[in-house]
Image (tube, rainbow, N blue to C red):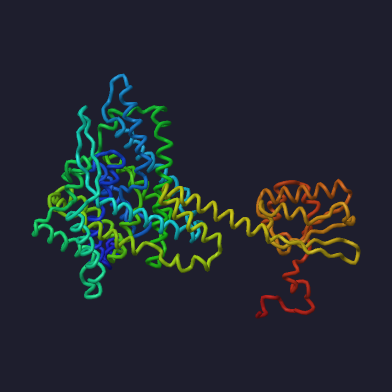
Amino acid sequence: MTEFLKKITPNAKNDVLAGITVSLAMIPEVVAFAFVAQIDPLVALSGAFIIGLITAIFGGRPGLISGAAGAVAVIFVSMIAEGHTKGMLFDTPVDNMGYFYLLACVILMGVIQILAGVFKIGKFVRLIPHSVMMGFVNGLAIVIFWAQVKMFSHKTLQISDEGVKQYVSSFMQGTELYIMIALVALTMAIIWGLPKITKKLPASLTAILVTTLIVVFSGLEVSTVGSYIIEGGGTGLKGEFPTPNLELWQHLPFNMDTLMFILPFAFLAASVGLIESLMTMNLVDELTESRGNGNKECIAQGAGNILSGLFGGTGGCGMIGQTVININAGGRGRLSGIMMAVTLLTFILFTDKLIEQVPIAALVGVMFMMVIETFAWSSFRILKKIPKSDAFVLIVVSTVTVIFDLAIAVFVGVIISALAFAWENAKKIRARKRYRADGTKVYEIWGPLFFGSISDFNEKFDIKNDPDNVEIDFVESRVSDHSAIEAINGLAEKYRAANKKLTLKHLNEDSKILLYKASPIFKDIIVEDIDDPRYHLAANPEKFPKPLGEYKF
């Protein structure tokens, strides 16, 4: 415990203030997540508190903020609707059954994420190219920006002649719109200008407080956190301390049908959650010039989701917007995440009426500044300087992130990058041909031999017209995969059918291991007792009479 306190206290002041700022910016996004998923806002807020606290304490990246984010909201929408329908078909119909399926799905989602951490899948985030990372950041900045633009509208309750209630959105107009724009501009101006005067005050938190005080004391009629929740169908922020949800075990049928129903949703939510969390972790690594632990973060995210499900909260993951706000506000340690979670719970339990008075304009201003900080403006400058394939990936990932979602964008970006890399390396296969004094034809292979290059590799050989003895020299090449093994195996069979002797020389150890495992014929054609010409020093003992270790090169 002493060591833990030592780790979280060096930047205590900045972490505490940053955590409070983030908690304020967290509320509207979490509430919006609840509306998308069609669940009670307090369910999402409880999930944000639990997931945020667990990942802050045990996660692999201090400074990363997690909560009930919108990245997984869309996944749960159809499951909740289907769950409600299934609940009505039980022998004893259960109201709100979709909610209980949601909690079970969140728990299973957490189990999958823990398994991902245990099996060290988190390390694969290092394979995500920088162009994908920039595209992800730009696309997400656009998504967050558009989400804030939607805040310039308000919802009104309409009741049809049949008595059906629905909320209809309409864009602000006239004085209401001008006041909203002015308050957003004021918030952004304070965040931009205050650090130029003094850095002792947290700019974002100060901007929120100043804008809120102006609204409260001037009596301006503007949209606030409280009115936003009510417009969305909620009843307010007032809640209770999260406790284990015993109704889950009473209503949820524990059978194979339940598992097969929630498993696809849980797996997809776990994948999306981990991708966003690990991508956010990479971004924090770049911003803070430090290194997080991806596998540890996977386990913490999973544990947070399991506890959230058990305590009646919904699922979540790392939140890039709130994380950037935290970093920009000076939050660097675990204390900032802990403070965010504790402050969020305090708001729900004790200060709900005060927080409900915070104008939405202040939070929109904070998010707009975060968008400006998040967007990789340098991408415009370097777009014509980087390889065309990388530029294409950057644009595609940004576009797919905006149109679809983050997970699909990352998968598409990685696939395109991998194919581009494979294509470029496939073109690098070369074969230099020469003859020895004894008539043996030597093919010196240059470049990697893998699935993308085997077609060009096979075209290099003239089996029909080659002499009886043929040698393939792999001194500047290596066998990379099963396709390469099959290509060499097929080549050996063709030379054998033509009654010609084929030998393979200068294969590295990894390549020889692959070939020996693949077929016994390679034991006859691979030459082992030969010096590698790249290390010709070993073949000239007369020139170097002393052991090579005694020479300085």
Residue 474, placed above or below residue 151: below
Name the residue at the front extreme: 174
Q: Is residue 92 left or right of residue 221?
A: right
Residue 166 % position (x, y):
23, 36
Residue 290 % position (x, y):
40, 66
Residue 85 % position (x, y):
33, 27
Residue 539 shows in this picture:
yes
- Front-most of 118 and 335? 335
Residue 174 % position (x, y):
19, 54
Residue displayed at 33% across by 22% down: 89
Residue 13, placed above or below residue 509: below
Q: Is residue 427 left or right of residue 270?
A: right
Residue 265, placed above or below residue 170: above
Residue 3 shows in this picture:
no
Name the residue at the right extreme: 438
Q: Is residue 441 left or right of residue 160?
A: right
Q: Is residue 239 left or right of residue 140?
A: left
Name the residue at the top extreme: 91
The image quarter containing residue 180 is: bottom left
- Front-most of 441 and 164? 164
Quadrant, the N terminus: bottom left
- Front-most of 55 and 69? 69
- Front-most of 357 and 241? 357
Quadrant, the C terminus: bottom right
So how many labels did they put on this image? Answer: 0
